[in-house]
Image (spheres, rainbow, N blue to C red):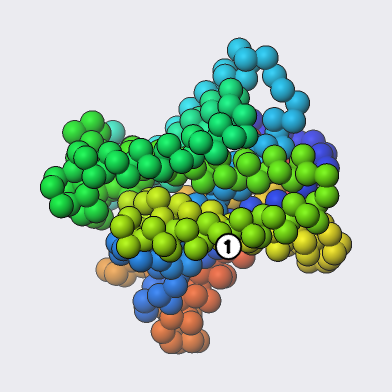
């Protein structure tokens, strides 16, 4: 990992806006203010179903794949390519693991104590990003466009088949009885899984297979943009393909329900389709129509997504470490004491999250102004 200070190269502005808007919404969803439940669309579906919050993570995977297509315009020899791919994946995975271990200490009855490794979560958001990045990077290195499409189909149908064939009879879509959960419990152990869902981890290992399709779809979209003779025609085809994938996901849902936590095939098709539509709209607006006014608000986040995501997750933990009363820390107190009296209910919760997101944006602005970019 390195922090570099250099002039940023010319970039595809719509992609930076797309990625930046995703980071903005991710922080907004993850930091709802205390004192009242947030709006239902800003909370992940408990199991089967779909909300706006469920779109955030697959969109970031899609954006990562899209950026990968632009980064690979200058091919490297196989050795350096694989070495760099594995290095980046390892760094991102390690950062995710350390983020969940942070702050490495906890306050107990007798004071502060070191948090043991054997109770630290191993799977997670950055960890899944790393594994998907690695798998997608290996596939795009040796497969052509048609072969990548075939690989996407194999990954989705293969994942579906594994769930149906190896889960407990009739319980392929059960949170605790599906084979993915069984693998996580056997291979990783309950102490290293998500603590708030009784042994189920939404970023479990098996879900890496379908999640990689979101990355590959973003890569294919980027390839289409780069190779297309007409950007306007490519954008139209992306929008049509997006609508087709959304309809395909909805059509598949009765047999393979839409579920973010299980990362089902229908969920992949739905989110990929929506991402294609959104990206096509952004390209049409920003690149074709030339309406770039205000885009810097999001590109500031989009140029430094890893740093800002880490900051957003770690800083709120630090705020909560400073206890104010028996109920929680500083961030909890801000939500209850400042924002709920200002706007009771979900609106106050949203305003608190928005204020925190703007703090993160200010950090991104300061880093961008100094030319600081955190890269794996």
Identified at 71% across, 43% down, the residue is: 224
Work out whether 350 lies above or below 374: below
Name the spot of residue 356 as percent of width and height, x first: 54, 65
Quadrant for the N terminus in the image: top right
Work out whether 237 lies above or below 333: above
Work out whether 3 lies above or below 343: above
Horizontal side of residue 352 vs 222, given as left or right: left
Name the spot of residue 83 as percent of width and height, x first: 57, 18
Which quarter of the picture shows residue 197? bottom left
Identified at 44% across, 44% down, the residue is: 211
Identified at 59% across, 58% down, the residue is: 242
Horizontal side of residue 141 vs 337, given as left or right: right
| Foreground of the two, 195 or 342 | 195
Residue bearing the label numbered 1: 243
Q: Is mark 1 on a helix, strand or loop?
A: helix
Q: Which residue lies furthest to the left in this view?
A: 169
Question: Is any part of residue 238 visible from this angle?
Answer: yes
Horizontal side of residue 286 vs 120, given as left or right: right
Name the spot of residue 22 as percent of width and height, x first: 58, 57
Horizontal side of residue 24 vs 100, given as left or right: right
Identified at 77% across, 39% down, the residue is: 227
| Foreground of the two, 261 or 171 | 171
Name the spot of residue 256 as percent of width and height, x first: 33, 55
Q: Residues within 10 Å of mark 1 (few under 14, many from 20)?
A: some
Which quarter of the picture shows residue 293? bottom right
Quadrant for the C terminus in the image: top right
Question: Is any part of residue 123 visible from this angle?
Answer: no
| Foreground of the two, 99 or 29 | 29
Circle count: 1
């Amino acid at each position: 990992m390195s922090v570099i200070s250099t002039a940023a190269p010319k970039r595809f502005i719509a992609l930076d806006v797309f990625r930046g808007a995703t980071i903005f919404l991710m922080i907004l969803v993850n930091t709802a203010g205390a004192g009242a439940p947030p709006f239902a669309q800003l909370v992940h579906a408990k199991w089967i179903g779909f909300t706006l919050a469920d779109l955030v993570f697959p969109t970031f995977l899609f954006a990562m794949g899209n950026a990968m297509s632009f980064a690979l315009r200058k091919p490297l020899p196989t050795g350096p390519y694989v070495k760099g791919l594995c290095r980046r994946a390892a760094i991102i995975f390690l950062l995710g693991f350390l983020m969940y271990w942070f702050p490495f200490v906890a306050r107990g009855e007798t004071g502060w104590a070191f948090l043991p490794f054997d109770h630290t979560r191993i799977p997670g958001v950055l960890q899944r990003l790393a594994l998907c990045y690695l798998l997608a990077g290996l596939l795009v290195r040796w497969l052509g466009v048609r072969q990548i499409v075939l690989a996407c189909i194999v990954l989705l149908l293969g994942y579906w088949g594994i769930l149906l064939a190896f889960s407990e009879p009739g319980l392929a879509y059960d949170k605790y009885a599906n084979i993915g959960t069984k693998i996580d419990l056997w291979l990783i152990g309950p102490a290293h899984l998500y603590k708030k869902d009784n042994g189920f981890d939404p970023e479990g290992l098996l879900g890496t297979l379908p999640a990689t399709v979101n990355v590959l779809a973003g890569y294919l979209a980027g390839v289409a943009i780069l190779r297309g003779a007409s950007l306007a025609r490519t954008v139209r085809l992306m929008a049509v393909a997006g609508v087709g994938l959304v309809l395909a996901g909805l059509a598949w849902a009765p047999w393979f329900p839409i579920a973010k936590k299980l990362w089902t095939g229908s969920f992949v098709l739905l989110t990929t389709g929506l991402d294609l539509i959104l990206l096509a709209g952004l390209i049409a607006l920003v690149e074709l129509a030339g309406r770039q006014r205000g885009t810097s608000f999001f590109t500031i986040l989009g140029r430094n997504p890893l740093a800002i995501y880490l900051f957003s997750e770690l800083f709120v933990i630090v705020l909560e470490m400073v206890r104010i009363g028996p109920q929680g820390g500083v961030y909890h107190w801000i939500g209850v004491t400042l924002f709920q009296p200002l706007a009771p209910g979900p609106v106050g919760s949203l305003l608190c999250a928005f204020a925190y997101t703007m703090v993160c944006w200010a950090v991104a602005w300061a880093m961008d102004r100094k030319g600081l970019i955190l890269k794996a």
